[in-house]
Image (cartoon, helix red, strand yellow):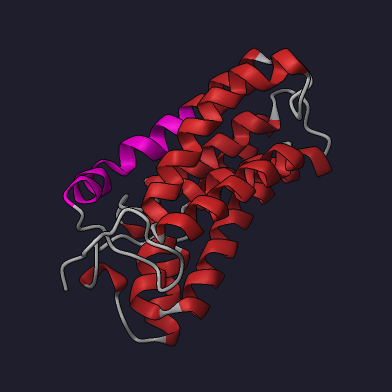
Amino acid sequence: METIIFIVIAYLLGSIPSGLWIGKIFYHKNIRDYGSGNTGTTNTFRVLGKTAGTITFLMDMLKGTLAVLLPVWFGATAISPLVIGFFAVLGHTLPIFAGFKGGKAVATSAGVLLGFTPLYCLFLLAVFFTILFLTSMISFSSIAVSVIGLITLFTFPAFHFILPSYDWLFTLIVSCLALIIIIRHKDNMVRIKNKEENLVPFGLDLTHQHPKK
């Protein structure tokens, strides 16, 4: 019963549509009516600006971190907190509070990793922001860091670098998170291929995208 309670809490935390609520409460805009129509960080950043986008990213990340840390704080040991954190990501992508139409799992997945393995999370965040600066694309950075995550899951433990040993559950859950992120960005991949992906207002745009206005 304790495990079920934490899973439900994690899903409900993940279901909080940060960008959607911020837009409606503070900007009187429904971000689903603008840009990609997505409720995640990227579209919030694009439609509502840097402040709203940054706050949305931090709130979405916090959802994953809290989902992992709550069972640890309360001494729940029946199941790995990583599994409970996965349900926060599920809630973020299929939120009950927003008609089961949510974000693309990037920030909440990062929050789960931050709560469970902070050093590995910081490594992936450093990779993410480096690629973001080079490409000016949050979508490309998200896809790239997911692929790098899949590779390092299997290579880092072999060298005892950041991830000291192989953990089948950790590998399975993080692989699922990476694949969810990649799949949720399938439309972005088409736009990137066509040189039409949306950009953030900084960075080098090395792929020379020309998004439609």
Image coords of residue 100 (percent x, y): 32, 49
- Left or right: 177 in relation to 120: left
* Residue at the farthest bottom position: 27
Q: Position of residue 81 (x, y in %)?
A: 69, 33
**Which one is nearer the viewer's eye here, 132 or 49?**
132
Looking at the image, can residue 45 be seen?
A: yes
The x and y percentages for residue 66 are 68, 50
Quarter of the image with the C terminus is bottom left
Q: Please state the horizontal and vertical placement of residue 139, each as a whole percent of the image.
A: 37, 51
40, above or below 192, in the image: below
Q: Is residue 181 magenta?
A: yes
Indicate whether residue 110 is drawn in magenta. Answer: no
Question: Over which residues does the magenta segment extend?
Answer: 176-194
Q: In which quadrant of the rendered view does residue 158 lie?
A: top right
In the image, is 139 to the left or to the right of 32? right
The answer to whether residue 9 is seen in the rendering is no
Q: Quadrant of residue 29?
A: bottom left
Q: Would you say 9 lies left or right of 133 here?
A: right
Residue drawn where x is 41% and y is 41% of the image: 143
> For this view, does 129 lie left or right of residue 22?
right
Tell me which residue sits at (74%, 42%) in the image: 118
